[in-house]
Image (spheres, rainbow, N blue to C red):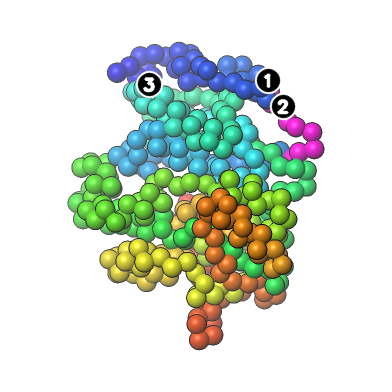
């Protein structure tokens, strides 16, 4: 199969950008910069995130198209947390000269398909050669009605804490996969994929998919935004406790999480028992779940639950914000309170 070295930079860019374009992309891939047409009365929302080989994934873990879809998802989740409609993306790639051109095209296809599902298109980018680990960086632009973007600052004492999905599943999937990789005596680069090892029990599949193949809550956020119920929001990309602490810090509030109302998750409980760690460690600890944490005006809970049903989004009301600034507490069934450790994933303190 031809590699980047075989086809050269200009031909690789031509192959990657053919067929790209849309009415709101006035000048697209192939020129020095993209020209994009914004709609009147909207604000532009921008985010960027990256996948780094050996840091966020190993080549055996995901097919190229799945890597593209994952890169799209982590950026789409940021726009969901702002209630922004995805519009345009800029992709930068650092690839080795021996990278197969077909694999790069598969990555691009997976990325483009995931973006298109939420209404976005690749409008430009950059391709560079590297000698070491490869990386893919996406900048995603969206739009939101002027002054209507959700932010982390806005939660008030008495607002309800709502959570989509089941927190901790991605972290559990990663823990299972890396445990089995260590048991096999390798780092995941040899001997198959985590699916082949950790999925010795097929029941683990939802946990592995939560980690490797996340889905952003864009449709839910866009459907919920008109209700005016959300006072603050953040996506859970580093862990439930860590990201809740960030929202509380931005809003200068605290939060009581009611243990009874956390989503029941027997599979997570089983994974915790298998790994020999408390389920709460998985649920609150480092985990790139790409779910949403929302501060909800109490009188508009019904509207949120209606949108969740209509979009088939799991949604639970799990606590209430307080005036105790920076204090995160887990409230047990008997009323006992215990502090929540706000530590989450840190790129510079440890690897995923």
Q: Give the residue at mark 3.
A: 101
| Quadrant, the N terminus | top left
Would you call the spot at circle 3 few (<14 residues within 10 Å), some (14-19), or many (20 or more)? Answer: many
Disc 1 to disc 2, C-alpha distance: 7 Å
Q: Position of residue 56 (x, y in %)?
A: 41, 45
Q: Position of residue 261 (x, y in %)?
A: 52, 72
Residue 224 higher or lower than 89, as above or below: below
151 or 188: nearer the eye?
151
Q: Specify the quadrant of the image occupied by residue 207.
A: bottom left
Q: Which secondary structure, mark 1?
A: strand
The answer to whether marks 1 and 2 mark residues whose Cβ atoms lie closer than 8 Å is: yes
Q: Earlier in the sequence, mark 3 or mark 2?
A: 2
Q: Position of residue 18 (x, y in %)?
A: 51, 16
Q: Residue at the location (56% across, 50% down)?
A: 311
Q: Give the residue at mark 1.
A: 26
Q: Residue at the location (70% across, 59% down)?
A: 229
Q: Residue at the location (26% across, 53% down)?
A: 202
Residue 96 higher or lower than 238, as above or below: above
Left of 339 or right of it: where is 97?
left
Q: Nearer the viewer, mark 1 or mark 3?
A: 1
Q: Which residues are magenta?
A: 35-43
Q: Earlier in the sequence, mark 1 or mark 2?
A: 1
Q: Which secondary structure, mark 3?
A: helix
Q: Is residue 38 magenta?
A: yes
Disc 3 to disc 2, C-alpha distance: 32 Å
| Image disc number at residue 37 | 2
Would you call the spot at circle 2 few (<14 residues within 10 Å), some (14-19), or many (20 or more)? Answer: few
């Amino acid at each position: 199969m031809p590699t980047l070295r075989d086809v050269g930079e200009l031909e690789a860019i031509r192959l990657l950008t053919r067929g790209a374009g849309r009415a709101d992309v006035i000048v697209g891939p192939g020129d020095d910069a993209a020209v994009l047409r914004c709609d009147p009365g909207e604000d532009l929302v921008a985010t960027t995130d990256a996948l780094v080989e050996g840091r966020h994934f190993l080549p055996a873990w995901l097919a190229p198209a799945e890597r593209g879809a994952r890169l799209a998802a982590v950026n789409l989740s940021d726009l969901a947390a702002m209630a922004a409609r995805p519009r345009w993306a800029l992709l930068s790639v650092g690839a080795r000269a021996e990278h197969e051109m077909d694999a790069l095209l598969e990555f691009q296809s997976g990325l483009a398909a995931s973006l298109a599902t939420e209404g976005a298109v690749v409008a430009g980018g950059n391709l560079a050669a590297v000698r070491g680990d490869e990386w893919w960086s996406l900048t995603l632009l969206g739009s939101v009605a002027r002054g209507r973007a959700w932010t982390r600052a806005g939660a008030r004492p008495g607002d309800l804490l709502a959570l989509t999905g089941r927190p901790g599943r991605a972290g559990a999937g990663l823990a299972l996969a890396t445990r089995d990789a260590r048991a096999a005596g390798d780092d995941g680069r040899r001997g198959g994929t985590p699916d082949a090892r950790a999925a010795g029990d097929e029941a683990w599949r939802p946990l592995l998919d939560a980690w490797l193949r996340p889905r952003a809550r864009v449709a839910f956020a866009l459907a919920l935004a008109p209700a005016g119920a959300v006072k603050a929001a953040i996506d859970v990309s580093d862990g439930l406790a860590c990201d809740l602490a960030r929202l509380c810090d931005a809003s200068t509030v605290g939060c009581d999480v009611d243990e009874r109302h956390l989503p029941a998750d027997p599979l997570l409980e089983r994974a915790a028992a298998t790994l020999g760690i408390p389920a709460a460690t998985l649920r609150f600890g480092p985990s790139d779940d790409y779910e949403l944490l929302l501060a909800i005006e109490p009188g508009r809970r019904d509207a949120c639950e209606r949108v969740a049903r209509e979009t088939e989004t799991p949604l639970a009301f799990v606590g209430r914000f307080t005036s105790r600034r920076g204090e995160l507490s887990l409230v047990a069934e008997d009323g006992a309170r215990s502090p929540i450790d706000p530590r989450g994933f840190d790129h510079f303190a440890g690897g995923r």
